Image (cartoon, coloured by chain):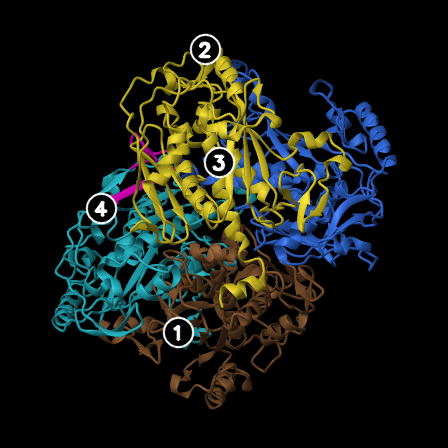
Chain colours: A cyan, B brown, C blue, D yellow
């Protein structure tokens, strides 16, 4: 089988290969009555589009979305929403030895092992272009969250060795630099680092952080459908993500209960927490405070250096990948992480609606 | 709703509260023809049982499992397997102010927000005892993996500040110390650290590592049902886990493509990798090499120190938790991580069976 | 795999064999705050219990239910509810040649073909006792429906050739006769027919009808999760059911649009329908009028006559089934049909809650 | 939510409205390595296309399919297959009072109740055009079944009062008449009946029968995912179907065990059944004999007669539906029933693959 669907009540199904005719997504379970236009979705897609800076591929794609169903007179109807983006730069080209070798760090070998052969054109379904469907769906999910007063802020916390510490966050700067870092100065340093990597025919990784504010408490379903479990799956399903953390994350392992526990207190009649090491999630449910999540993204595996590898005939060989590739995945993946978070939050908000009998009675009376 | 089921084809459904009459699991989708006895399952349960060392709760439980269905004349029949463990130490007791305050670091507040009230006896469903069902199911999954030549090794890599580095691993020592560390000397240091924490009425966290060997290549379903996405969800669904990593994990963010890519080569006719930064997973599918995964576990939130918190009437208060609690969750959670990994691997192995038409034709001819 | 779970948000997972130690069900997704006791469930179980009349098996079972989880201080907690019924009459007995032959009309042959062998004791998982879990879950679902003003009436419309026509329905008589027919006189005739069948060592079939009143309009999810599609699956999943109908049912095939369409009209400000050939479902959604559904139940396959069949060694043989078997399945299956309907309705009511953005905003504000 | 997906391992997700820009389906879980072209799919679509006879709508649609993903160099790749059919006849038109009244027998009222408003153009998502996605997916499923030696024959058994009895079946005639009946003479009578109905501005219903040959035994998952339960759901999810039967179906209710049981016997070393009242399904699993299933289809609700109904403002009104509508749904629905059967069978065949440990070991060795 293949697992192209995500979500239980708000379900997205993506399809499409890098060099096929089109890429798209079907969103099922979107409520009726939401104002939705192609512009709403295009805004999200433009954040991952190629050509935004010198650190992105030269592939020419406008990534223009078309709504094919589920919207009538400007509003969602409650039925399945089909979104499509035509691939423009799908010209027949010389794939060199790409078709016959397994690129290190790529899924060439595993796809071949699973399916017996693979669509070698630009990575096929394992291409970064696969995320177009996710982002289009994320735009729709964001419209829902907006109406519920929930907001997601996502940014590059680290680019290679350059990290923005929490005290230096300036969220208003995220969209002022090409790398979506919350600090323009650090972004400048990161750009320099990336230029250096490009000169060395190398690539870099980084960390994407995501903060959700306005989330009501109690969202997430014990015990397997925990909010963090589902967010974690959503983020780990994005290619190149190798780790996911919540709140204190890996550092929690080094802490002690006395300092890691977030003390509750009441201030002006409102429940507060002294700290947020939990990252807004306790027992797999939102606690009403900011949800804080981080994803570690590996360096782009496509590098211009000559690499040792193996071909499909089982022989040792050398590989030189032509064309210009993004020296870093992180900036364009920021909106992908945000989209997957949005899709997951909407799904969990919907799942929560049947947890209390009194609220169900209210709903139906 | 609540999310007490995990898995698609090999599906487990757990139930039971810490101080209810029993705890159990239903395993659905277990193939017919596997020799299975209560002893097989008990071996796993004994690894998480209380009372194994001075670092575990004083609660007296034999955690004896009974098979109620799905096994006939010593073999699984292919139908649902129901396993039950009766709670022994469920005597009515004085819960002190536990019933009326929100313990920091616990799910008391979020359960109450979600459901309107909660079963306050010993954490109810958010208790560590909930994992009994997972471990019982993990024992069954392990029997399946065994027949496929797949083996999982799980251990405590870190206890607080004490970490065993890869070059110091002695896997045969894992079951020689109470902390399930792969190095007895480091385990000794960790025990000293834990004793110190207990003296200070404090607790510690740690890191659990899991290595899967013998996994065939190509397991995992693009694009949302990736192997790492599902393993990640499985592990993050365990209470107290705050982060999950694969291969280089968080460190991948600091690396460069030239060093992070695992070069393929052929040696003696066999495909090998020069390194395994990918942790055995490429493009969301197993690559045939060891799968390496780590989980960060937070320090036990129940500590004997006085803590500031809030009660259910919205007033500031102080909390003193009585009774002896595990100063660390890690050692008993080792088998829980292994169990969730086993359950996930089996499910993904089954899902993979319909990926190629030629193999399906073979199967049915 | 095996498919022991039913439902998406209100999910039941049943387990247990006829002659194993116990039978049970886990109900996941039951909302918090419902008053629930063993008595509530026992009332449903008693309707399918053996020994209610001379037309039921002589097996001695009290079918007493125990609640193992998910209820605290008399109310559901929102977490998984585990219900168990111990089998009492599971003594080792002489199964004669049951173990080695395929009984006609039973699942012996298909179970063996699927799983390689089978639990031959009393039909194992294909026994009518499997429905205990369904009925226990149905009792819980009925509690939910009750709070929403939804009521289900179920009865035997036909027993063999004896049918109660709609104009002769007296719903208050359903529980006044052993056959659960809505007309005591017809029930008397049916009893005579059944006595005759028993004398002839034969068995009979019948039709169960189910009427749901008080259902709000708009429940059911286009296009595959239609209300009738899910109810149909629920009913067809009950052993021995060979057909399911809604409203005019099979007769709709003979009708014309002009007479089959149910005309809408307004009377005293309320929308009414002149007829209900649709059986309360239009386009897969409830239309607010009575849902009417029928299930055809085949005659009990276990008959005392000598039958020709084949043994597991592939040889022709004769079969004589010993012991007394119900000459008809229908009366005890009435509550099973009602239970499966209840479980399905609850699930669909919950799924409907996220269909409109305005209602979601209301819910969360 | 909305339920636009069907299937567990072989999953189809359909989308699109009658008068939107396009209609389509995403097929997820199709194995790699199947030769698949647009011609394969077009052959199925042409069987439900309008304009095949005088008994079909005048809407001009070529219903040409385009493959957008999941096929590379003529073979399925194992990833999601996206199929699209552009609507051609979607011109803006005068919908008369369709937008403001509830058509009897249609889903106008229920859609409005559920979603708060509806896409009134041609029925939106409740239009018969919704089935295009099902049929396109059915064509792909049929390719899989073909390789497994499984064949489905589907036809109109009854058109209004004209029924073809089993002894008069001539399967080779099914494609020789416009009504897809297995007997040309009866088809002629049915055509006359339909002409008469059209003259009377009325419509007719009928019965579609489906016979599956070559099915291996043991397919179907106890106890809720029975083969008949899933086939039943699949068929009942098709608009206008009001009942579904297997084997003896509704008639089983009138039979006795002695005559309804299908006796097994061995002939020339092969297991045979004396009769097939079970319709090829015992205990929810295929028994290796022909699966026989029937669906009752109601008469087309759109008739040219003046009908009494209610408008969206809650007032009594009269409705005249303009344009020519199919006087019968059955002939074009034949391929829809076949398609849903095919999709279900493939899914259940895949689910069965992990039922026996010995076969799993074989598969992976």
How much space separates mark 4 and mark 1, taking CA atoms? 41 Å
Given contact means CB atoms under 8 Å apart, are the residues at marks 4 and 1 in contact?
no
Given contact means CB atoms under 8 Å apart, are the residues at marks 4 and 3 in contact?
no
> How packed is label 3: few (under 14 Cα within 10 Å), some, or many (20 or more)?
many
> How packed is label 2: few (under 14 Cα within 10 Å), some, or many (20 or more)?
some
**Looking at the image, which residue sits at the far right?**
C199
* In this rendering, the label closer to the viewer, 4 or 1: 1
Provide the secondary structure element on which disc 2 rests. loop
Residue, disc 3: D338
Residue, disc 1: B289
Q: Which residue is located at x 37 percent, y 47 percent? A: A13
Q: Which one is nearer the viewer's eye here, D313 or B342? A: B342
Q: Are marks 4 and 1 on the same chain?
A: no
Q: Which residue is located at x 51 percent, y 79 percent? A: B201
How much space separates mark 3 and mark 1, taking CA atoms? 44 Å
Q: N-terminal of the two: label 3 or label 2?
A: 2
Residue, disc 4: A43
How much space separates mark 2 and mark 1, taking CA atoms? 70 Å
Task: Name the quarter where the N terminus of chain C is drawn.
Answer: bottom right
- A83 part of magenta stretch: yes
Residue A321: % across, % down: 18, 66
Report the span colored magenta.
A68-87
Q: Does residue D318 sit above or below C63 in this rendering? A: above
**Looking at the image, which residue sits at the far bottom?**
B185
Residue, disc 2: D201
Residue A365: % across, % down: 53, 33
Q: Is residue A276 visible?
A: no
How much space separates mark 4 and mark 3, taking CA atoms? 42 Å
How much space separates mark 2 and mark 4, taking CA atoms? 51 Å
């Amino acid at each position: 089988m293949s697992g192209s669907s995500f979500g239980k009540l708000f379900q997205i199904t993506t399809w499409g290969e890098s060099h096929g005719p089109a890429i798209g997504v079907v969103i099922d379970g979107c409520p009726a009555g939401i104002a939705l236009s192609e512009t709403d979705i295009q805004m999200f897609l433009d954040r991952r589009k190629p050509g935004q800076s010198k650190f992105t591929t030269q592939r020419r794609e406008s990534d223009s979305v078309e709504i094919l169903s589920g919207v009538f007179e400007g509003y969602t109807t409650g039925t399945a929403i089909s979104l499509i983006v035509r691939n423009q730069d799908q010209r027949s080209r010389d794939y060199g030895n790409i078709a016959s070798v397994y690129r290190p760090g790529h899924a060439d070998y595993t796809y071949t092992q699973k399916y017996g052969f693979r669509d070698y054109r630009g990575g096929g379904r394992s291409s970064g272009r696969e995320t177009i469907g996710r982002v289009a769906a994320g735009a729709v999910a964001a419209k829902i969250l907006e109406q519920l007063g929930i907001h997601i802020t996502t940014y590059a916390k680290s680019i290679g060795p350059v990290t923005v510490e929490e005290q230096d966050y300036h969220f208003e700067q995220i969209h002022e630099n090409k790398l979506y870092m919350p600090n323009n100065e650090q972004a400048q340093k990161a750009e320099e680092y990336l230029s250096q990597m490009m000169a060395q025919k190398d690539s870099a990784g980084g960390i994407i952080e995501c903060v959700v504010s306005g989330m009501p408490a109690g969202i997430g379903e014990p015990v397997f459908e925990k909010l963090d479990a589902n967010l974690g799956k959503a983020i780990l399903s994005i290619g190149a993500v190798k780790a996911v953390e919540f709140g204190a994350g890996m550092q929690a392992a080094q802490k002690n209960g006395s300092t890691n526990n977030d003390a509750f207190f009441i201030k002006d009649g409102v429940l507060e927490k002294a700290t947020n090491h939990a990252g807004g999630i306790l027992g797999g449910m939102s606690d009403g405070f900011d949800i804080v999540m981080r994803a570690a993204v590996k360096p782009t595996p496509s590098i211009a250096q000559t690499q040792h590898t193996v071909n499909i005939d089982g022989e040792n060989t050398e590989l030189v990948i032509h064309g210009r590739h993004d020296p870093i995945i992180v900036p364009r993946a920021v909106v992908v992480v945000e989209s997957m978070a949005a899709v997951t939050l909407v799904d969990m908000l919907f799942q929560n609606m049947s947890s209390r009998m009194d609220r169900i009675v209210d709903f139906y009376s």
